[in-house]
Image (cartoon, rainbow, N blue to C red):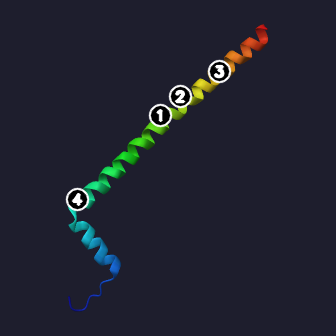
Amino acid sequence: MPGSSFTLGDMALRLERLDPDRRRKRLAIIAELAGAKAVRERAIPRRLQADRLRELIATRRRLAG
């Protein structure tokens, strides 16, 4: 194209847009990572709640003993 300069980055972006299989795989990986992050974020409060419950039980045992 006259008057425009292309860099390797521009070419890579254009090639990536043209490869639907690579794009599909990339989107699948991003979706898996998002799902894993959501599971971790849900698990953290449960862990904290379990830790608090264990601490409460330990405190009661010390007071009763």
Would you say the residues marked 1 and 4 are in contact, meaning their CB atoms lie under 8 Å apart? no
- Looking at the picture, which amino acid does disc 4 mark? Asp
28 left or right, relative to 2: right
Whether 30 is drawn above or below 9: the answer is above
- Looking at the picture, which amino acid does disc 2 mark? Arg
Query: Looking at the image, is mark 2 or mark 3 earlier in the sequence?
Result: 2
Gap in Å between the C-alphas at discs 1 and 3?
A: 19 Å
Q: Secondary structure at mark 4?
A: helix
Whether 58 is drawn above or below 23: the answer is above
Query: Looking at the image, is mark 4 or mark 2 earlier in the sequence?
Result: 4
Q: Secondary structure at mark 1?
A: helix
Q: Where is mark 3, residue-wise?
A: 54
Q: Secondary structure at mark 2?
A: helix
Residue at 40% x, 47% y is: 33
Q: Secondary structure at mark 3?
A: helix
Query: Looking at the image, is mark 3 or mark 4 earlier in the sequence?
Result: 4
- Looking at the picture, which amino acid does disc 1 mark? Arg
Rendering coords of residue 44 (x, y %): 54, 34
Residue 46 got which mark?
Answer: 2
Gap in Å between the C-alphas at discs 2 and 3?
A: 12 Å
Q: Where is mark 1, residue-wise?
A: 42
Would you say the residues marked 1 and 2 are in contact, meaning their CB atoms lie under 8 Å apart? yes
Query: Looking at the image, is mark 1 or mark 4 earlier in the sequence?
Result: 4
Q: Where is mark 4, residue-wise?
A: 21
- Looking at the picture, which amino acid does disc 3 mark? Arg
Task: Name the quadrant of the N terminus.
Answer: bottom left
Gap in Å between the C-alphas at discs 1 and 2?
A: 7 Å
Q: Nearer the viewer, mark 4 or mark 2?
A: 4
Report crowding for label 4: few under 14, some 14 to 19, many 20 or more residues within 10 A (C-alpha).
few
Rendering coords of residue 52 (x, y %): 64, 24
